[in-house]
Image (cartoon, rainbow, N blue to C red):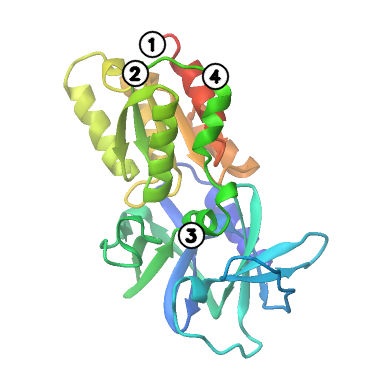
């Protein structure tokens, strides 16, 4: 699995390039992709132990070493035709949101390096409408690769592992807060949960954008108004993985701007690891929080905006 690890290290050495590396894989002959940063390793599919009363797309569990990992039949989740389980099919073992899962796929094609600008938001009719499972379509060497929203998949299969709006209640009684919070999040489901959580925490003025480019355009317009920037945006909350412009590139642009740099930037992502945390620090992110820690996110927003 060293090829995956080496690739991940290579991309992590660079900061704010607005690029990512995608692992291409197939299911029933169709081409899909996953951010290499989410992939821990790939291995040949193994025998699994079925689990009673589990979700219908959960094949079961297996124990590759000293841990038990849940296996998800990705083709079944996507309602694709059954592919040939010929002994060459693959488990893609992922790590994000501090959890490990294995996704059963047909084959792994390879790893490609692409710009987020080359990844477009899919049409709403593709893979489930407004809250569909495709976060982007990447074009690479005349191939179209569907980038899947693995966080949404896990949230549906294991809701307790996703953002819990109710957890904000443990912060106690809160008053309404007039400060404007700018969110950059491409997942429709997660954006909805974040907005609900912030509303519950008293932050009623939320500007929601679907990617770093939209957020950057909003910030530039706010700057050009000539008003004090904090009157328009008190804090930016950004995912890392997003089409057109990722969260690291957005952070870099904000912190290099003489006016916008005073806005606190919080990276709120399933990909916060030691390596990526260092990258975020280099770019100037004020805080980095791993999803789904929404109550912690609210507390950090409170702290970073208390003087504004």
Residue 281 is at least partly visible in this image? no
Q: Residue furthest right?
A: 66
Image height of 203 relative to 15, above or below: above
Q: Give the mark, 2 or 4, whose residue is nearer the N terminus.
A: 4
Q: Do tag 2 and tag 1 residues touch (Cβ < 8 Å)?
A: yes
Q: CA distance from mark 3 to mark 1?
A: 38 Å
Q: Give the mark, 3 or 1, whose residue is nearer the N terminus.
A: 3
Where does residue 215 sit, x and y in percent of width and height? 30, 37
| Res. 209 image quadrant | top left
Q: Is residue 26 left or right of residue 58?
A: left
Image height of 225 relative to 70, above or below: above
Nearest to the observer: residue 65 or residue 175: 175
Q: CA distance from mark 2 to mark 1?
A: 8 Å
Image height of 208 relative to 271, above or below: above
Q: Do tag 3 and tag 1 residues touch (Cβ < 8 Å)?
A: no
Q: Residue furthest left?
A: 225
Task: Residue at 34% x, 42% y: name it.
Answer: 212
Q: Which mark is residue 21?
A: 3
Nearest to the observer: residue 90 or residue 291: 291
Q: CA distance from mark 2 to mark 3?
A: 36 Å
Q: Give the mark, 4 or 1, whose residue is nearer the N terminus.
A: 4
Identify the residue position indicated by label 4 in the image. Answer: 172
Q: Do tag 2 and tag 4 residues touch (Cβ < 8 Å)?
A: no
Identify the residue position indicated by label 2 in the image. Answer: 179
């Amino acid at each position: 699995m060293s090829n995956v690890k080496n690739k991940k290290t290579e991309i992590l050495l660079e900061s704010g390039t607005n690029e990512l590396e995608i692992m291409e894989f197939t299911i029933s002959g169709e081409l899909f992709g996953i951010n290499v940063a989410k992939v821990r390793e790939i291995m040949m599919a193994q025998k699994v132990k079925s689990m009673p009363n589990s979700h219908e797309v959960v094949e079961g569990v297996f124990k590759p070493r000293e841990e038990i990992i849940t296996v998800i039949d990705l083709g079944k989740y996507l309602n694709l035709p059954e592919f040939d389980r010929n002994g060459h099919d693959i488990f893609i073992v992922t790590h994000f949101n501090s959890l490990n899962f294995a996704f059963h796929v047909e084959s792994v094609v390879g790893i490609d390096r692409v710009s987020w600008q080359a990844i477009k938001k899919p049409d709403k009719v593709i893979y489930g409408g407004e809250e569909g499972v495709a976060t982007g379509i990447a074009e690479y060497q005349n191939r179209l690769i569907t980038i899947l929203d693995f966080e949404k998949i896990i949230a549906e299969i294991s809701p307790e592992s996703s953002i819990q709006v109710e957890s904000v209640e443990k912060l106690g009684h809160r008053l309404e807060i007039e400060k404007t919070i700018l969110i950059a999040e491409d997942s429709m489901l997660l954006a909805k949960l974040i907005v609900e959580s912030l509303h519950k925490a008293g932050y009623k003025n939320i500007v929601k954008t679907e990617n770093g480019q939209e957020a950057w355009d909003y910030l530039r317009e706010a700057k050009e108004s000539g008003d004090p920037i904090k009157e328009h945006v008190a804090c930016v909350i950004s995912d890392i993985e997003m089409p057109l412009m990722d969260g690291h590139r957005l952070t870099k642009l904000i912190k290099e701007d003489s006016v916008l740099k005073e806005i606190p930037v919080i990276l709120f992502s399933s990909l916060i690891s030691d390596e990526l945390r260092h990258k975020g620090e280099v770019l100037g992110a004020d805080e980095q929080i791993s999803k789904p820690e929404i109550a912690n996110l609210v507390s950090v927003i409170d702290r970073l905006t208390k003087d504004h």
